[in-house]
Image: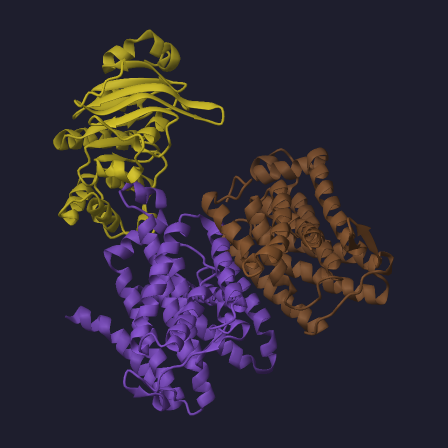
Amino acid sequence: MTSNNPSYVLEAQDVAIHYGGVKALDGVALTLEKGQIRGLIGPNGAGKSTVIDAITGRRPLTRGKVLLAGEDVSHLGAVQRRQRGLSRSFQRTSIFGGMGVRQQVELASHKMGVADSAQDAEAVLQELDLARLGDAIAGDLGYGEQRRLDLALALVGRPKLLMLDEPMAGLSVQESLDLARHLKALTSRWEVSVLLVEHDMDVVFGISDAVTVFELGRVIASGEPAAVRADPRVREAYLGSAA
Amino acid sequence: MLAVNLFNGLVYGALLIVMSSGLALIYGLRRVVNFAHGALYMLGAYIGYTVAMHSNFWVALCVAPLAMAVVGVLLDRYVFQPLQDHEPLNVMLVTFGLLLILEDLVAFIWGKANYSLFTPELLAFSVRFMGHDLPAYRIGVIVVGAAVALGLTLWLRFSKAGLFVRAASTDPVTTSMQGVNTDRLSAGVVGLGSALAGLAGVVAAPFLSLSPHMSSDVLIDSFVVVVIGGLGSLAGAFAAALLLGMMQSIGAVYLPEVSVLLPFIFMIAVLIWKPSGLAGSRT
Amino acid sequence: MAHLLRMLSWPLLALAAGAAIVLVTRSNSLLGMFTQAVIYAIFALGVGVLLRQNGLVSFGHALYFGAAGYGMGVVLTLGWMPAELAMPLVLAALGAAAFLIGLVIVRVPGIAFGMLTLAIGQMAYLLAARARGLTGGADGMSIPWPNTLFGVPQSVLLKPSVLFMVSWVVLVAVAVALACLLRTRFGAITEAIRDNEERARFIGIRTTVPRALVYALSAVVTGVAGLLSSLNTGFVSPENLHWSVSAITLLMVVVGGFRKPMGPIVGAVIYFLFKDLLGEYATHSMAIFGAALIAVIVFSPDGITGAAQRLFQRLWQQKKGEGRA
């Protein structure tokens, strides 16, 4: 069912990424509504990160389309998608190790065209409890702090769409829950639509409005958290008896 | 006129095959762009010259590459291996430093005069081919180039060591985990590559004169060949070497002003289109 | 206000130091060597800014060094315009050409970039060596500087002390200009690109144009050195374009340390100092620099200035520790 429905802030239609004989994504369809948090779950290698790469323009599509508010952005680069309000964080922390914390967040805000980038940056740093580390060099930060910085670089500049690739990776249970609460509050306050890839089931089912399940590059189930959880195909493929 | 130029192009191409295969092998295994290769070529030529002056050319042909092989093993053991975790550009600069040192060493030992090595008597005749007189020695150079190309290809394809080299060039970590002694393998390959440089030097000596600057010219052409062919790809290097030799000699006839620029223009074009070279897959 | 004064104090001190050198040095040949060192320090600053801001190693910057000289030579010989006008125009032309070249080549990664610059540089060298006619081919060309430049007569301008002072002032000006530029938003952008090119794109930075601009900037700085050199010697030849010149300057940058703004300058000074001190061993200078290069890369990859900084930091920590205890 393809539709260029502009009420979806994000739509992926029949997205496929093939390379070297591997079908990383094989005909994926996804939608995201305004202000919605959609969780993406699935076993390792199921294609969750690849979907984010496809949507943000990090990897070229073999087939299919990516639409932002009805506009086909499949051939646009990462910079242009960012300018349309699409922002992402990285599974493997990707920050500017040699620059100051405040400096890089402010730069990211400035690049999004925010008038008062310093204020915007400060606000985001406060939200993620990084303000006191503002003058530190990013490379000197601890692992958890660096992950929050990675997130800050994505959050700054009031993005409309946020793609989060395993933001909780490596964090403790308590840190994960805190971060999840933060994200839920932030995104509802700023009306950001979120695609969240995560392994932690509690987090995903706790904050998502909708969940999509991946397996082997395909979507095997999609819908409200409770329904997905109860879906026998999902239980069999992924949740097993843990759910 | 054209035929003679084509022939000379083949000769230079063959020389480049011998030079650049060594460079390509070393890059493939150690990810090092080896500036010192030019110095090895030069050392090979000078050592060959000295040996030939005291005995004959054929002994020199054996001794020089062997001597360079030893230098190569030492190079791998004491330079490439300890520095393998450094930035590739830093290692490249280190090899450049070595080039400077070795050039000075040659000038110090042999002096700055130009030397000439005479063609060995056995090959000091001409062969009549298609209405032209082709020097037998130069035909010999082509034979050497072809032999090296063939020998290396067969060795890589069919021998156990060759298999290890191909594996280690692609994935050094996994290969060493499989029990292959990659350090010993590298020493062997760098030794082989250096021997090839030395061989090129001795072979070139009779028709290119010896001077402390001889490393630069051939080195740059070899870089061009290896980069165009694809860093690390032997087949690419062979093809590019022949192409380069041809281009320079044909160009000398039809576009004499521009002919020297052709290799560079070609390299620039290739690099811009495909930064990893024509056949290469890594930069 | 105090901040501004502090910022100005360094350049003013530097200028004063230059004047002091002139007053103290009696020997003209020594001054001549100093002038050469200063010119190469500017050259090294050009190569260094490319390495520092873009993380790119160029083996072909001698192209811009020699091209500036050839540009002046051609323009003045053909009498197109007065020298005072020609100088900024030649630099502007170099910058524009470098920007266009940069747009294409900065996209090529790592070692391939180095090889590209080597190729472009050598092409320029070969062209210059073979082109007979106006540029004199392998013999080079002399540059017909006018009798007065900016109102100063040649007899005054070409005095070793004046040449030195002029070069020194230019060095200080270039160093200050670079330092200021890199503190701007542009500096932050290029630093981000060099630090993490992928993330830079994902926060909305178009990476090609800023890097090409840095390349053009490095070319112009190198061109300034080339201009000064052509004034100093009155001559330009294909040797100014040879890749060995680029490589030696790169050597100065690495040995001095490219991370600190002073690094390339320190490297150039050390090079010339050694060359002079080596005296009878000067014929082996290249080998010694080769060894120095290797030593620096193995033991202190951020050069002499990097090692000096670490030493000072350790001494400072020690002092602080002692103070507390």
- The tint chain C carries is purple
In the rendered view, does B140 fall on the left or right side of A195? right
Identify which residue is drawn at 37% across, 12% down. Answer: A240
Q: Decide: is A218 above or below C308.
A: above
Q: Is residue C315 visible?
A: no
In the rendered view, does A109 fall on the left or right side of B200? left
Quadrant of the rendered structure where residue A87 is? top left
- Return the x and y of residue A9 as percentages of the image width and height: 20, 26
Front residue (pair C168, B241): B241
- Return the x and y of residue C142 as percentages of the image width and height: 46, 79
- The tint chain B carries is brown
| Image mark count | 0
Give the chain coloured yellow.
Answer: A
Front residue (pair C73, B196): C73
Q: Decide: is C159 above or below A226.
A: below
Identify which residue is drawn at 32% across, 70% down. Answer: C174
